Image (tube, rainbow, N blue to C red):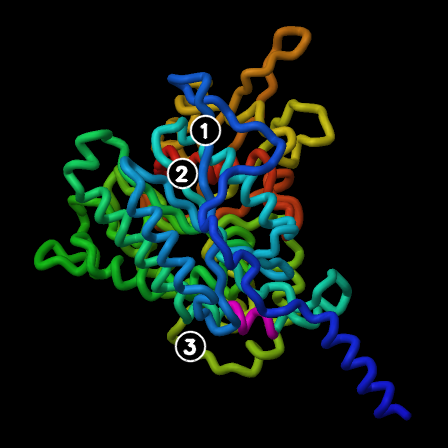
Amino acid sequence: MRALITIIALGLILQGCAPLKQYHPAPPYFKTYDLDTPLASCPNDSAKKAGFQHGFIEFDEYGNLLNPDAFERQMADIRAVNGPLLLVTYLHGWRHSAAPDDDDVREFKLAMRNIAAMDGCKRTVVGLYMGWRGQVFAWNSPLDLITFWDRKQTAHSVGSGAVTEVLLRLDKERVRRNDNSQLQAKSNTQTRLVFIGHSFGAAVLYTALAPILIERFTQSSGFDPANDLATTGCEKNPREPLKTVGDLVVLINPAFEAMRLATLQKMSMGCHYTEHQAPAVAIVTGTTDLATKWAFHIARAPRARFQKYTDDVVEGYSANSTAVGHYEPYQTHFLSSPTFSPDNADRETFNGCEQYIDPLKSDLRISLTTLSTSEPSRTVRFTSQQKQIDGSQKFFDLHLEKNPQLKNSPDHNPVLNVKASAPIINGHGGIYSCQLMTFIGGLITQTITN
């Protein structure tokens, strides 16, 4: 009888499993914005909207492309675009997929809308949503929690597959465009490429790119030069910025252990950089993200405890059982929003963000440039075009402060590990606040240095 009950229960669970399938198999491969929330107007032409196109690239459990032909078609469409591009890829996290009704798909479109607005219609904006089977069950239930270990392993498997090929081909297109004199003759705005991952999607992304980041770091002119060699193997007075893949890698509430960042962290901390060095990797983790702070540690600790560590390596059990954003020795900055004046229920969603991100307002750009100063604490104020009855404007402040406990941190370090307080990030999935999207949008569109 017990065996029969077990078989029936297993059958019901299996029936409730989310299928491994392609959710966007047919043309058009690129889609246009289809949500009700309006697009912003372009600065020089109020009749033109700051729009974008987006497509879907989907992978199986091992990182294989589910539809290689669809990806090739999208690459062909990207190559056919005249003028500079802003390419943004997004890898979703645990308990999500590329399903059309998935919350992350909708939020991705809204995020791309605001990124396009912040870019001020300078480039053709293309967003690529990269889907994998982050959701095991077809519905949300407490059973999802038991999939942590399986989905973490799957995330690293996906990142070891064709994801690297896809990202490198996009990077090759970025390089081709920026080296093309004919394209540059039309505009002095360069094509930019940004990779973004959330939760286990950040694990997919970092797994795919970590070896490339390390390789390009070591191939940069400032690393291991023929003369003027510092003890770390880095040039004391580098002549040019660091080589990297794409323009920026953003990892939001990443669900992987700090140990995986150790090599890149040590390399970045031991070098010197030019004043023009922009961030290459930006890790942003919420102080209220208990999923990566406590749940990740509880799930990771047993395995990490039984692994061996040497006394010669500073990183040990703690780094191997703690999510990278919560590992204090690696935290470089703190991001806070002490002043938030809009008093409305939508202030932490994109429903209330139209008033903050508008390319018609020049003060957004002026404010963002203040992050380039050498001051240890930088305040950025974003004002809106909407005035209150009393004539005042809505605004919020963002404070980006270097970690005073992190000794010998070089100026303009290209690897940022930022701890963000609420309401910038609320919990593990609350990553779509106006403040966070504006900060990331500034990194993407304004080439903020730190």
> Which SS type dominates the magenta stretch?
helix
**Circle 1 is placed at which residue position?**
50
Query: Who is closer to the viewer here, 140 or 275?
Result: 140
- The residues colored magenta run 150-155
Q: Which three-letter amino acid code belongs to the residue tagged 1?
A: Ala
**Does residue 404 appear anywhere in the picture?**
no
Q: Quadrant of the C terminus?
A: top left
Q: Is residue 124 left or right of residue 318?
A: left
- The residue carrying pointer 2 sits among few (fewer than 14), some (14 to 19) or many (20 or more) residues within 10 Å by Cα, namely many
**Circle 2 is placed at which residue position?**
125
Q: Quadrant of the N terminus?
A: bottom right
C-alpha span from label 1 to label 2 = 9 Å
Task: For the residues labelled 1 and 2, say whether their Cβ atoms are less than 8 Å apart.
Answer: yes
**Circle 3 is placed at which residue position?**
311
C-alpha span from label 3 to label 2 = 49 Å
Q: Position of residue 210 (x, y in %)?
A: 37, 63
- Residue at 59% x, 41% y is 432
Compare marks 1 and 2 and give the one earlier in the sequence.
1
Q: Nearer the viewer, mark 3 or mark 2?
A: 2
Q: Which three-letter amino acid code belongs to the residue tagged 2?
A: Val
- Residue at 42% x, 46% y is 88
Compare marks 1 and 3 and give the one earlier in the sequence.
1
Q: Nearer the viewer, mark 1 or mark 3?
A: 1
Task: For the residues labelled 1 and 3, say whether their Cβ atoms are less than 8 Å apart.
Answer: no
Q: Is residue 435 above or below residue 305?
A: above
